[in-house]
Amino acid sequence: MELIVDIGNSSAKIAIFEERNIVFQDSCRNDFLKPLDEIIGKYPIKRSIVSTVAGLKGKVGPQLREAGLPNVLLNDATTPEYNKRYGLPSTMGSDRLGAIVAAKTKFPDRNILVVDNGSCITYEFISANGKYLGGNISPGIYMRLQAMHTWTSLLPLVDTEGPLPEIGYDTYTAMRSGAVNGVNHEVEGYIRHTLTKYPDLITIVTGGAETDLSVKGAEIIYDKHLVFEGLREILIDKVPDTIQTK
């Protein structure tokens, strides 16, 4: 079994794979080191990988080593072959790298747009011949709502739950619709624009924030485990095992 730890800006996500199947998954916003001990003790884990954009690798790594797990802590020094293979910048975040690796593993001969809708929305463009064409980052839904509240005097802090009309009828629905529907329109715009250059484009959407997309002629796949799957591919590559992967 493989343990995958993905530490983001708003939460830490943990998954355990048995071959290609996720047999355990959890997400927590606060301290996850204690439940991690319990997980390690419960499952026969053979190897592990930690991806983080929140700077906690220094705490997790020793914990995994104490458990005797072969582990990979993703950083610039551990992924030069991937940077070279896909033509990635050295500043590429490990979560974005995981999404790219998984997407290209699933669709090796396709032009791909990966959309990860989390705290920030990331867009990754990968060509059919496996080259990274670039990417964009923009504020996610919750960040937009938080920013409107933080950087104005009177706008309230609005949650995503509640009425979501196409056009708001009061301050709350106007802000919620502006953030949620605005993200949907933004993502759809990226897909339409990329389709004009790559008619065979496949779009893979992942991340915690839900989106309701409709683009004529577009092939859109939703895969909430994309980053986990890519991190597992990197782990298998970095820490070979005698098990047969399928």
Image (cartoon, helix red, strand yellow):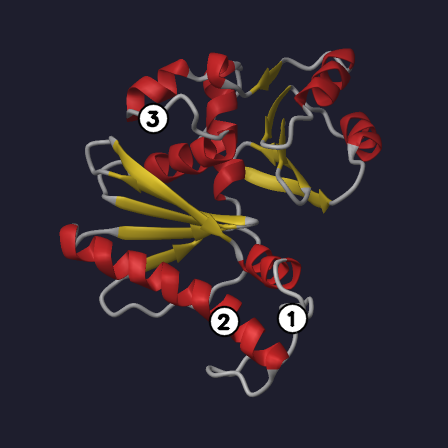
Q: Crowding near pointer 2: few (<14 within 10 Å), some, many (20+)? A: many
Q: Amino acid at mark 2?
A: Gly
In contact (CB < 8 Å): disc 2 and disc 3: no
Q: Secondary structure at mark 2?
A: helix
Report the quarter where the C terminus lies.
top left
In the rendered image, residue 131, in percent from the top left (x then y), is placed at 24, 30
Q: Crowding near pointer 1: few (<14 within 10 Å), some, many (20+)? A: some
Most extreme residue toward the front is 153
Reading the image, the residue beneath label 3 is: 88
Q: In the displayed structure, would residue 117 be above or below residue 159?
A: above
Report the quarter where the N terminus lies.
top right
* First in residue order: circle 2 vs circle 1: 1
Q: In the displayed structure, would residue 134 be above or below residue 213?
A: above
In the rendered image, residue 104, in percent from the top left (x then y), is placed at 33, 36
Q: Amino acid at mark 3?
A: Leu
Q: Secondary structure at mark 3?
A: loop
Q: Identify the residue shown where x is 46% and y is 82%.
A: 166
- Spatial CA distance of label 2 from label 1 is 13 Å
In the rendered image, residue 95, in percent from the top left (x then y), is placed at 51, 34
In screen coordinates, is 232 left or right of 127? right
Instruction: Examine the rendering and report whether any part of residue 72 can be seen.
Output: yes
In the rendered image, residue 132, in percent from the top left (x then y), is placed at 28, 33
* First in residue order: circle 2 vs circle 3: 3
Reading the image, the residue beneath label 1 is: 155
Q: Identify the residue shown where x is 30% and y is 62%.
A: 189
Residue 178 — which label? 2
- Spatial CA distance of label 3 from label 1 is 40 Å
* First in residue order: circle 3 vs circle 1: 3
Q: Identify the residue shown where x is 72% and y is 12%.
A: 65
Front residue of this view, candidates 121 and 244 = 121
Most extreme residue toward the bottom is 169
- Spatial CA distance of label 2 from label 3 is 33 Å
